[in-house]
Image (cartoon, rainbow, N blue to C red):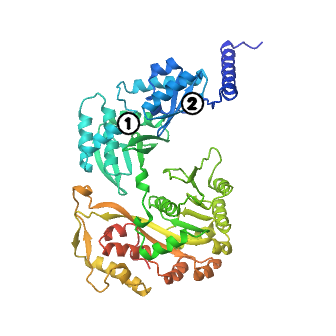
């Protein structure tokens, strides 16, 4: 005879009761109260939202704030009443927040309320480490003018009072990174210490070192902020938002386990950094006129290529802003949506929902679009649908991973696109790299070495042989070669560089290129034919920017082979 397991039986009954309660609440929410229903027991809770309503008040009113997105706050409610709605709306409006209400079970409320306890254990101060105040960031940023200032403040905080040390340190790190316009924050544990580095103009710079105990506390604080599991030691990704000067900045968090602990990278997604007008990307005037003409066509396929971090997304967004009009429907499919563009429908792929690039592209085509931007063409299905879309009256922008513009056609053929169809679809193949600009404050002329002169003359010779006119670029080919360097100053954080600019090359699908596409040409064959189009190659574009004093030879040579044929 089998033993009766009373504990197991009680658990099954409890689970059944909970399921029945959820079903009842879902029915009441829709039929009686006209509110959306949500089950929070299966969803994550946004730590930042909890600060909007104190725990005591939340328990008394039987409500729970569970998500904060910009100025929008999502609040779970157990018993919907007009007086309750009015009170919550009034309270949220005072905090400049717009509430949305959801009906939930008691189990959902309890889950959120338990989170309050977790937060209070992490930090007992009222200021709190999970609520990064925009005002505090602004005040901190006022005392930061260069990267050394951040290091000094971090060291002072690490050696100071233990009260709120971690909260203050995170504020200094974030405020400093934003003040000097860093794109990424790296917090890494080493054998005997923790290290902080900031990525400035694409290059990592050491900022400060501190003890491992402080690293561990900082690690926990960042996990809380990002909604990640505190005890988990596996790879995790999360995000949180902060308000700075009226702008919502998203911070994307990535943790990966290492030898001495988890390496943390915080990517700062500043909407201002992506809002670069097409005119300011650094596209040479002749190519700019071609690009402007091509992106305004009613249909076609324009592909931008380059390695990760070469500014491809910024270029695509600049295309979209240039052609944006209320008269056309623009849809994007991205992975993920990092920056929001006003007036444009942006969708994000999700492998969990089986919503990938091909499926996103098929769905977008059912929305009657005029222009589609696909974040990346990385498989055969996406490539074929993108080409087909360009043939059926749509303008398609996307990116592709190749080393140069000539690599686009072989790559598409490799992905299974029919060369005969590609001839009619592909309008422009464009490649780019980002180089740092010399600091205008400390830039000076320098005499080039023999090796530098030989390299520059080699590129100048290629421009001349291809019949390109130097006078268009305000360069005197017969004048002595001048180079520039910048030793570094306070304005450029002693790096000698300040800001970045693109170097570009492109190939139009003209009559000559159309002729060779069906023959499955090599990159070398495509380059040979494309030289007749009069568009500068990347090394030639880099040369113009070197001779104009915009950047240095070393910087261009770090991203492009200056001696390639």
Q: Position of residue 191 (x, y in %)?
A: 34, 41
Q: Is residue 47 visible?
A: no
Q: What element does badge 1 sit on?
A: loop
Picture disc at residue 101: 2
Horizontal placement of 425 versus 134: left or right? right
Pointer 1 and pointer 2: residues touching (CB < 8 Å)? Answer: no
Residue furthest out toward the right: 1
Q: Residue at x 38, y 51 (%)?
A: 183
Q: Position of residue 332 (x, y in %)?
A: 57, 55
Q: Residue at x 49, y 33 (%)?
A: 46
Q: Position of residue 70 (x, y in %)?
A: 47, 40
**Residue nearest the observer in this picture, 480 or 364:** 364
Q: Position of residue 370 (x, y in %)?
A: 62, 62
Query: Mark 1 — residue?
Result: 132
Nearest-to-viewer mark from 1 and 2 = 2
Q: What element does badge 2 sit on?
A: strand
Mark with earlier residue (1, 2): 2
User: How far is disc 1 from disc 2 in space, using C-alphas?
Assistant: 25 Å
Q: Residue at x 43, y 29 (%)?
A: 51
Q: Residue at x 32, y 64 (%)?
A: 437
Residue 385 location, quadrant: bottom right
Q: Residues within 10 Å of mark 2 (few under 14, many from 20)?
A: many
Q: Is residue 80 visible?
A: yes
| Viewport quadrant of the N terminus | top right
């Amino acid at each position: 005879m089998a033993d009766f397991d009373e504990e197991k039986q009680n658990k099954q009954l409890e689970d059944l009761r909970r399921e029945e309660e959820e079903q009842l609440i879902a029915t009441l929410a829709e039929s009686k109260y006209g509110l959306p229903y949500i089950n929070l027991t299966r969803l994550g809770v946004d730590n930042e939202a909890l600060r909007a309503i104190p725990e005591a008040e939340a328990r008394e009113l039987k409500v729970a704030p569970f998500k904060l997105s910009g100025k929008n706050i999502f609040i779970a409610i157990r018993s919907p009443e007009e007086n309750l709605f009015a009170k919550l709306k009034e309270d949220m409006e005072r905090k400049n927040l717009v509430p949305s209400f959801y009906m939930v079970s008691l189990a959902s409320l309890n889950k959120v309320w338990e989170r309050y306890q977790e937060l209070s254990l992490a930090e007992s101060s009222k200021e709190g480490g999970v609520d990064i105040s925009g005002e505090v960031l602004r005040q901190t940023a006022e005392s930061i003018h260069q990267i050394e200032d951040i290091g000094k403040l971090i060291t002072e905080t690490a050696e100071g009072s233990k009260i709120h040390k971690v909260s203050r340190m995170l504020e200094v790190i974030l405020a400093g990174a934003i003040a000097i316009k860093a794109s990424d924050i790296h917090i890494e544990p080493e054998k005997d210490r923790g290290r902080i580095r900031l990525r400035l103009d694409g290059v990592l710079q050491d900022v400060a070192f501190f003890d491992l105990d402080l690293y561990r506390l900082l690690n926990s604080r960042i996990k809380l902020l990002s909604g990640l599991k505190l005890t988990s030691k596996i790879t995790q990704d999360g995000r949180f938002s902060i308000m700075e000067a009226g702008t919502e900045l998203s911070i994307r968090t990535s943790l990966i386990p290492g030898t001495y602990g988890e390496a943390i990278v915080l990517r700062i997604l500043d909407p201002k950094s992506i809002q670069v007008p097409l005119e300011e990307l650094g596209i040479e005037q002749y190519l700019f006129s071609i690009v402007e003409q091509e992106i305004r066509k009613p249909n076609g396929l324009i592909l931008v290529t380059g390695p990760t971090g070469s500014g491809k997304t910024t270029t695509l967004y600049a295309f979209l802003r240039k052609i944006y009009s209320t008269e056309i429907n623009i849809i994007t499919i991205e992975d993920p949506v990092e920056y929001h563009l006003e007036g444009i429908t942006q969708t994000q792929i999700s492998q969990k929902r089986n919503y990938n690039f091909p499926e996103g592209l098929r769905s977008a085509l059912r929305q009657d679009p005029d222009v589609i931007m696909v974040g990346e063409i990385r498989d055969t299905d996406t490539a074929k649908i993108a080409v087909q879309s360009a043939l059926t009256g749509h303008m398609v922008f996307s990116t592709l991973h190749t080393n140069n513009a000539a690599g686009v056609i072989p790559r598409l053929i490799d992905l299974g696109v029919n060369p005969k169809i590609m001839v009619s679809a592909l309008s422009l193949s464009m490649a780019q790299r980002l180089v740092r600009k010399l600091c205008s404050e400390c830039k000076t002329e320098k005499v080039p070495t023999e090796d530098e002169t030989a390299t520059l003359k080699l590129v100048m010779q290629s421009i001349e042989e291809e019949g390109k006119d130097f006078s268009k670029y305000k360069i005197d080919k017969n004048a002595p070669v001048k180079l520039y360097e910048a030793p570094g100053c306070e304005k450029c954080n002693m790096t000698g560089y300040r800001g970045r600019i693109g170097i570009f090359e492109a190939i139009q699908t003209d009559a000559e290129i159309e002729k060779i596409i069906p023959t499955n040409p090599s990159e070398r064959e495509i380059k040979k034919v494309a030289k007749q189009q009069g568009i500068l190659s990347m090394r030639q574009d880099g040369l113009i920017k070197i001779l104009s004093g915009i950047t240095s030879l070393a910087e261009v040579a770090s991203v492009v082979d200056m001696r390639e044929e």
